[in-house]
Image (cartoon, rainbow, N blue to C red):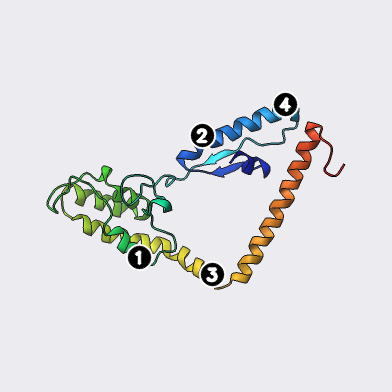
């Protein structure tokens, strides 16, 4: 991870909670290398983390963070039907055995998803109806499914649009790869010069 970041001299890096410590290692490597070889003109910036409010989302099984390998995710490209099929059996507040049992939204995984996908007034309504047993968990899931579908719809539409133009996408990826290679070569040339190595081919 450190090499991938430093090679392109990234200043900001989007990470999840479980990657912050790896980014700190990268920052330490940048500091030490700059101190040893860069003098008054640092080569590597100390990258700062970009942490979003949704940086860690618990999976639909309620056991761990969302992970494709665990099969507890909802993908950006999921259809409305697929979203509902995944939300319907999702784990909720274990204390709500029946619809008439009041719940505690703060310990319910789906309430956390509401905070990311539903407007504030809906989040408040969900919390109230959970605590008072005004809604059953299935009612909560239906509202969440609708809001997730609405939020993800533009991303899904854009994804389908790009999928219909594979040649154009391939060209964009190739252009980005060329730019990345140029940046990597420039970084390595600077690094080898500062460390006193001979240029490549000499």
Q: Secondary structure at mark 3?
A: helix
Q: Residue at x 15, y 47 (%)?
A: 102
Position of residue 30 in the picture relative to residue 155 (left or right): right
Residue on which disc 2 sits: 21
Q: Nearer the viewer, residue 126 or 78?
A: 78
Find residue 34 and report its image quarter.
Answer: top right
Which residue ends up furthest to the right in the rendered image? 202
Label located before the other in sequence (2 or 1): 2
Tell me residue 148's x, y (percent): 36, 60
- The CA span between labels 2 and 4 is 23 Å
Residue 146 shows in the view: no
Q: Residue at x 68, y 43 (%)?
A: 7
Find residue 136 and report its image quarter.
Answer: bottom left
Residue on which disc 4 sits: 36
Residue on which disc 3 sits: 163
Q: Which mark is residue 82?
A: 1
Position of residue 173 in the picture relative to residue 103 (left or right): right
Q: Which mark is residue 28?
A: none
Tell me residue 67's x, y (percent): 41, 50
Tell me residue 21's x, y (percent): 51, 34
- The CA span between labels 2 and 1 is 35 Å
């Amino acid at each position: 991870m450190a090499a991938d970041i430093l090679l392109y001299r990234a200043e900001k890096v989007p990470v999840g909670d479980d990657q912050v410590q790896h980014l700190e290692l990268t920052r330490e490597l940048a500091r030490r290398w700059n101190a040893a070889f860069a003098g008054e003109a640092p080569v590597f910036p100390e990258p700062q983390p970009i942490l979003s409010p949704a940086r860690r989302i618990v999976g639909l099984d309620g056991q761990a963070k969302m992970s494709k390998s665990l099969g507890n995710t909802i993908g950006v490209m999921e259809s409305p039907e697929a979203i509902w099929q995944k939300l319907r059996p999702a784990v909720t507040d274990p204390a709500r055995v029946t619809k008439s049992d009041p719940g505690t939204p703060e310990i319910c995984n789906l309430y956390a998803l509401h905070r990311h996908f539903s407007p504030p007034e809906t989040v408040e309504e969900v919390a109230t109806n959970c605590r008072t047993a005004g809604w059953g968990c299935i009612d909560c899931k239906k509202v969440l499914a609708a809001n997730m579908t609405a939020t993800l719809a533009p991303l899904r539409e854009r994804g389908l649009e790009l999928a219909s133009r594979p040649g154009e996408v391939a060209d964009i990826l190739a252009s980005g790869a060329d730019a990345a290679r140029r940046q990597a070569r420039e970084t390595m040339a600077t690094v080898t010069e500062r460390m006193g190595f001979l240029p490549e081919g000499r």
